[in-house]
């Protein structure tokens, strides 16, 4: 029998569960019945996100992230969340700025990509409001979700052996029963809730994604609850004309919400580009706690829903401009930077 040769004794496996317990959960709460799952964004967040949940957002960096859902979580004040920050940035950083994230498992998450570090997230760690409970890599996060998707309790690799990451990731090191050499077991991760933003979906939850899928496929199959926000709802017949583009099947999805421009101020490939002007406004506001409060009051607490938010950020004029930039009709503006 292979023995555990190295592990961090007090590591807590956030998001981990016995695969058989997850199978029982899915038998009880997931259905293969093809039924309509359209709800409003407010309903999807009320019903799908609970205080204390382990939450993971789809997309990567600032691309195709479900920002409208993030704004609604802030409006509803759902807190004490634990986040899997697997290359996530503005999504969980904004929730942290709003005081709703208590714990984070981090691969890469404290930066605003090329725009600089997130001051509110860094400050939250420094003053003890945010606890970094483990550190890992983007690849290890994907393998955690892959193990969960496959109904396994771990994913074998050798990537962190000999590094400190092994000790801060919840992984265990054993002796490979075939080679006798060390091998790392990365624990599976079953998030309580995953929110994904896609280019299009049908009313049942079949989702089509253009461009890089990142880890959305694995996340959708690993999560206990899956909320989809989509740029547009299309007929099932249109989905069926391009089955190769359907990356997430309806039977793993719990709620579907049509949210045009649902990733603003971030990018959705082939539809609209980053809003650098709005990014600069956030970066400037986030330099102080007072600025953060003013930003949240103006754009989130001061708006009834995402449509009012879109009007407040400049409405149709700005949105058309972002479409033109994405499609090469207008030049890309100066990239926003932390000042």
Image (cartoon, grey):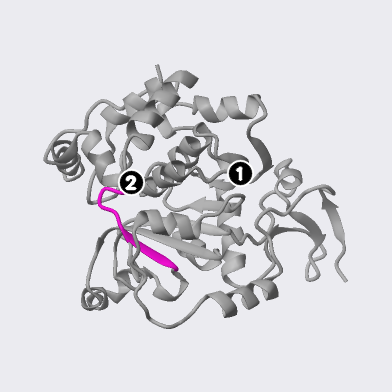
Residue linked to disc 2: 263
In the picture, residue 324 is in which quadrant? Answer: top left
Magenta segment includes 257: yes
Q: Residues within 10 Å of mark 1 (few under 14, many from 20)?
A: some
Looking at marks 1 and 2 on the same chain, the residue that comes earlier in the sequence is marked by 1
Which of the two marks, 1 or 2, is nearer to us in this view? 1
Q: Which residues are magenta?
A: 254-262
Asked if residue 214 shows in the view, the reply is: no
Q: Position of residue 238 (x, y in %)?
A: 21, 74
| Residue 201 visible to an observer of this rendering | yes
Q: Is residue 49 magenta?
A: no
The relative height of residue 280 versus residue 146 in the rendered view (above or below) is: above
Kindly give the residue lying farthest to the bottom in the view shown: 33
Residue at (81, 70) in percent of width and height? 177
Alpha-carbon neighbours of circle 2 within 10 Å: few (<14), some, or many (≥20)?
A: many
In the picture, measured across the screen, residue 288 lies left or right of residue 162, that is: left
Query: Residue 108: which disc?
Result: none
- Say which residue appears at 33% left-offset and 60% top-offset: 257
User: Residue 209 at x, y = what percent?
Assistant: 33, 61
Circle 1 is placed at which residue position?
80
Residue 80 figure quarter: top right
Q: Is residue 5 above or below residue 335?
A: below
Front-lying residue, 158 or 282: 282
Q: Where is 176 relative to 27, above or below?
A: above
């Amino acid at each position: 029998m292979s023995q555990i040769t190295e592990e961090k004794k007090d590591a807590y496996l956030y998001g981990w569960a016995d695969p058989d317990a997850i199978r029982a959960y899915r038998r009880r709460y997931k259905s293969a019945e093809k039924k309509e799952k359209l709800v409003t964004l407010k309903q999807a967040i009320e019903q799908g996100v609970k205080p204390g949940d382990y939450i993971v957002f789809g997309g990567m960096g600032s691309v195709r992230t479900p920002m409208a859902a993030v704004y609604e979580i802030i409006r509803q004040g759902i807190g004490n969340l634990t986040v899997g920050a697997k290359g996530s940035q503005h999504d969980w950083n904004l929730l942290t700025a709003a005081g709703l994230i208590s714990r984070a498992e981090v691969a890469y998450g404290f930066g605003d990509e090329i725009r600089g570090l997130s001051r509110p997230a860094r400050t939250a760690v420094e003053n003890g409001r945010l606890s970094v409970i483990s550190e890992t890599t983007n690849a290890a996060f994907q393998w955690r979700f892959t193990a969960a998707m496959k109904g396994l309790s771990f994913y074998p690799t050798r990537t962190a052996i000999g590094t400190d990451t092994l000790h801060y990731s919840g992984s265990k090191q054993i002796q490979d029963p075939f080679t006798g050499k060390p091998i790392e077991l990365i624990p599976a991760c079953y998030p309580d809730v995953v929110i994904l933003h896609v280019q299009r979906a049908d009313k049942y939850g079949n989702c089509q994604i253009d461009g890089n899928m990142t880890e959305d496929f694995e996340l959708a199959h690993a999560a206990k609850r899956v909320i989809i926000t989509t740029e547009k709802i299309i007929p099932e017949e249109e989905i069926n004309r391009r089955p190769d583009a359907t990356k997430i099947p309806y039977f793993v999805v719990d709620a579907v919400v049509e949210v045009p421009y649902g990733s603003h101020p971030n990018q959705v490939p082939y539809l609209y580009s980053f809003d650098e002007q709005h990014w600069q406004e956030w970066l400037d506001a986030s330099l102080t706690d007072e600025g953060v409060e003013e930003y949240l009051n103006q754009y989130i607490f001061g708006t009834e829903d995402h449509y009012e938010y879109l009007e407040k950020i400049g409405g149709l004029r700005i949105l058309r401009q972002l479409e033109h930039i994405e499609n090469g009709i207008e030049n890309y503006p100066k990239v926003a930077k932390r000042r």
